[in-house]
Image (spheres, grey):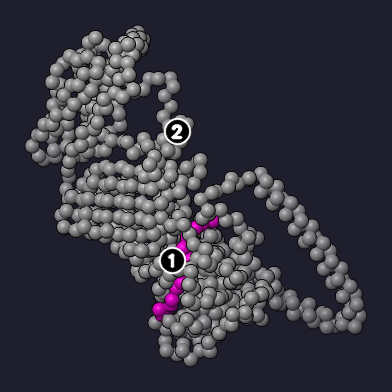
Amino acid sequence: MIKKSILCLTLLTFCNTAFAARDILPISSVYSGQVGTAYTEADATGSLYPFTITVDGVTGDKNTQYIMAKASGSLMNATNGVLQGMSGSPVFVDGKLMGAVSAGFKGMDAKTCLITPIEEMRKLWKMADRKNNRKIEPFDLAKALEKRREEEKTELRKKIEKKLKDAKDAKDAIVKRYKEEETKKKKAEAEKKTEDNAKTENNENAKINDKNKEEKVNVFLTGFNDEGRKFLKEQLFKDKNMDFLENASVGGVSGNIQKELKPGSALGVALSYGDFAIAATGTVTDVDGAKILAFGHPFTHRGNVNYFMTNATVVGSIPSNAEAGAKMANLGDVIGRINQDREVGISGVLREFPETVKVNTQVVDFALGKNKSYKSYVAYDEELLTPVTASLMYAAIAKTTDTTGEATARISCSIKSDMIENGVYKHENMIYAPSDFGKIAILEVAEPLNILATNPEKDSAVQDIEIKVEIAEGRHTARLVSAIPEKSVAKAGDKVNFKVTLRPYRGKDETVTIPYFVPYTQAKGDLTLDVRGGGLIPLTTDTSMFAQEGLGEDTKTKLKKLSETSSNNDIVIAPGAPAALMSENEQKKMIQRALEAQENAEAKFGAKLKNPPKNKPYKTNYVIENYVKTRIKIEG
């Protein structure tokens, strides 16, 4: 925690209108040796503490420039430098907002920091926001590029005109003062040369050190154990320099903002809240009415987003040592939404709330005798809905089972959306994995969510997601041994019962009876049947010249087919490919027999063709690992 001496600091109190119309200090006016003051919350009092910022120079390139500086003062002495969580702390120079403290440097004094220029951050307020409306308008790229070219021409013309005017004014001033201040001018030129050399040296050092730029950010979590955190990092924060800290309890949605947000206030951004929360805290840089800017660096770096904006209360600060220190905070109620998450920071709008998807996950572990249910709320953002939901599901499994060993699980899920018949997608499956089965289990939810999230027709309007995972330790699999028909000769439309023998892993053989209805349109001759596990790829090859899997299918069709897909624990009997390859003449004869069978069926069965008997999968308590072939003869 911060030392008691920090309480003796002079506190800065903002009145409601102090920053109603803030001026900014452009980066073109920043120079080495310039001194400013930054403000941040550092303890539970909610007060804003000042610390001094001394500019070293400007680093970066023409696209992204940062101000390199050193922090000092009583607060920095107490914290041993800039802490994670102070990102976004506003820096003022002579009352003008210069930017946000945003990063430090690996292997350097924690009091050395980078400042993101406010003029770059304010651009976030002008960026297009196409999220949170469920009606995404098409983006006209050609029109946008043309508009940008016109803007660039206008900007260039203005810059040229300004440079010409500045040059003329400078020339007039020089001529006017030349005779009377020649000696003074030479002295000033000598001083400027010395200052420029020092500034160049500082900037070169800044460019070298920028390679070790380290953003000051922590991700706060609730409900995740070690395995859940590892999986979350792989899904959302891979290759990002982030530490996970426990304690991100987020309240409900509230329009009542108990604490006025101002530059220097603590702020939270969350992807989810509830039993599993994923959030980060930082500092507000700028406020304009309901609009806010914060962090000075990205959170997920995904551009136009739709996340929860929350209150945050600082608990205390852990001073820097060999490892980075941190400003610890609790997250409060949702008070708005974050709509931009980019290189220079995040922006959002107060009292405008993200659409939300409720994710309920129930995990039953028979070995441990556990039955746990978890409820979380995810901000509806199509790009992150799948990885976030998958992470919450994995976290629920990891937390309940407390193992990544061998297991078999039955998974069922339902997803509410207007892109499926009756408004609800449902599917059930059974999986076996020798280790970390949670990574396979999440595919049962990820696959339909991916279809919905990439819907090319419109936003899929995903609502509630219900997941149930039932887990048994060990391997519950079986192999098919044989499939014997009760009769070897049948007719189109007949029911044929098969005695199917399966051999459970390290268990005794079991025999079940499975009916098969011969299609009305089945041609005469030998009928080869595949008896297989429902999760295995069908062995029948569609020889139709029009067979183009998935081509032209809309989202509703894809989801319907997925929901009707057989499970791994099903036994399916279906026509299969002949055991031997057919010659061209044999294939022609087969096609001719199929056409004749269709004509005979229409004459013999008539209306029955509209509703033929369905061959339903036979459910077992095992994951079926193989297939066998069998054959019956069809007569007229």
Between 5 and 62, the one lying in front of the other is 5
- Please identify the residue farthest to the left as the structure is shown: 508
Residue 137 vs 202, above or below: the answer is above
Q: Which residue is mark 2?
A: 553
Q: Dominant secondary structure of the magenta stretch?
A: strand
Residue 493 vs 503, above or below: the answer is above
Task: Using the rendered view, name the quadrant where residue 448 is placed.
Answer: top left
Label 1 sits on a secondary structure element that is: loop
**Which mark is on residue 253?**
1
Residue 245 vs 420, above or below: the answer is below
Q: At which x and y percent is residue 627? A: 22, 29
Q: CA distance from mark 2 to mark 1?
A: 38 Å
Amino acid residing under circle 1: Val
Between 336 and 399, the one lying in front of the other is 336
Image depth: mark 2 or mark 1 in front: 1
Q: Neighbour class for label 2 at 10 Å: few (<14), some, many (≥20)? A: few
Task: Using the rendered view, name the quadrant where residue 115 is placed.
Answer: bottom right
Q: Which residues are magenta?
A: 303-321
Amino acid residing under circle 2: Glu
Q: At which x and y percent is residue 203? A: 62, 69
Mark 1 or mark 2, which is nearer the start of the sequence? 1
Q: At which x and y percent is residue 519? A: 27, 20
